[in-house]
Image: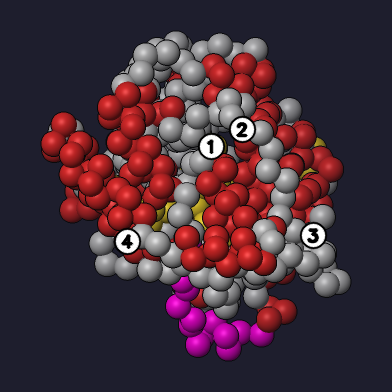
Amino acid sequence: MTRAPTRRAFLRGAGGALIALPWLELFHDPKARAQPAAARAQRFVAVYTPGGTVLNKWRPTGSETAPVLSPILAPLEPIKQKLLVIDGLDMKSAVGEQHQAGIVALLTGTPQSSKQRNYAGGPSIDQVLAGLSMKPRRSIEIAVRWATGKSHGLLSPINALSFENAPGWKPIPPRLDPVQIWNDLFKAQTAAPSADAASRLARKKSVLDFLDRRYASLAGRLGSEDRAKLEQHLTKIREIERTLAELPKQTNTCKAPALIDTKNYDPLTGLDSADNGSLKDTSTDAEIPKVGKLMIDMLVMALACDMTSVGTLQWSDTEAKHTFPWLNLSEHHHFYQHDGGFRPAECEKIGRWYSEMHLYLLQAMAAVDMGGHTLLDESVVFFGSELQDPPSHGKTNMPLLLAGGGGGLRGGRWLRYNNRSHNDLLVSILNLFGDARMTFGDPKYCAGPLTNLT
């Protein structure tokens, strides 16, 4: 695989360190505290998978209360009673570039905004919910095999899922390095007391002290667009560093997951990507299932340990220009969607594998006892993509799922709506958390909350 060592070395210092830094602190919301605990969902997780679906292999059969899961969704059968298949919603607010507009709108309900460099025109629902949370920290954003293809390892409208709940609505880059994430979240929890104290002290030292000289010497070698993106990364480092906090101690519920060997996985391999996906890192690609499960384990424990109540997981970006060796698929996902002509059999195979990973997440949450109920019981988990139909980039009948029992969500059902806007689902999710608003995102795409979720 072709390497770009100078650019890569610099970005390992800047982007890599940023992505693995801890979360920002939450602001407490008195209105949120006033909600009765039993009436509100407590945790929110959003999971993004790229490239839509093969609709006739995704859509269930049967009835609302007795759905027969499709070939793509069949792996979710063991957790079906906690699952809601949401059918018939259109992503009407996805106005802009074909893929970019979809990922931007998925959690924000806004079109791409030229005033915001083609990012979102408002906050993402995860960040709004983070502001409603009673937990002491904001959120955690993680991703697997992210920023492939044209984004070349950098934050872009092609891969941005979460947006700050503050004027400007800046995109939030996910963390990519599983070892750095584990160290940030769990190392102090598992260390001996003396080492623990030293670790906490070390983490409070500014990463910028290490990066500034490196940045100054190498920034001049980058183009103006890359420099602007890296300045944004460094700004995020400063913001995140100001909010380093103490980590919880290990308990029966809060247990650090095992840190597996990920030496063959390069979290920053996107830096070396080609626009057309012709540069392949099959060694890293082969590790995606193993690393993905570790990322899920860390996210679940971050929730169980009360480190945060909000998390997002991105399985790649909208281009997904990586291979699937464990599925015997040697081309990238975008190739099977339309670059190589629509390949429904391959897309179905990929979609089914993602359902297997969804099952892993939901079962991991269901295995955590929160005191008479499970972590999944008090949570809302949202699964979505940036489009529905790969060859046409169509965004009607979006493939959306909800899972969990938070806010009274009732699973085991297949709900069909007649071309309602997906913004109305975002409103409904907010309502499950005690937020009574009637619109979210661009109000012209809202008709009010959906019925029959609870």
Measure how far apart labels 1 and 4 are at the Cα level: 24 Å
Q: Pointer 3: what residue?
A: 368
Quarter assignment of residue 407: bottom right
Q: Residue at x 78, y 67 (%)?
A: 251
Q: Earlier in the sequence, mark 3 or mark 1?
A: 1
Give, as a single range, the part of the protein colored magenta: 23-36
Front position among marks 2 and 1:
2
Task: Write down the residue under mark 2.
Answer: 262
Q: Position of residue 265 (x, y in %)?
A: 56, 29
Label 4 environment density (alpha carbons within 10 Å; few <14, some 14–19, many ≥20): some
Mark nearer the N terminus (1 vs 4): 1
Of the image marks 4 and 3, the number of the one nearer the N terminus? 4
The answer to whether the residue labelled 2 contacts the one labelled 1, judged by CB atoms less than 8 Å apart, is: no
Farthest-out residue, front: 194
Image: 344 above or below 150: above
At 36% from the left and 55% from the top, the residue drawn is: 207
Task: Give, as a three-letter code, the residue at label 3.
Answer: Val
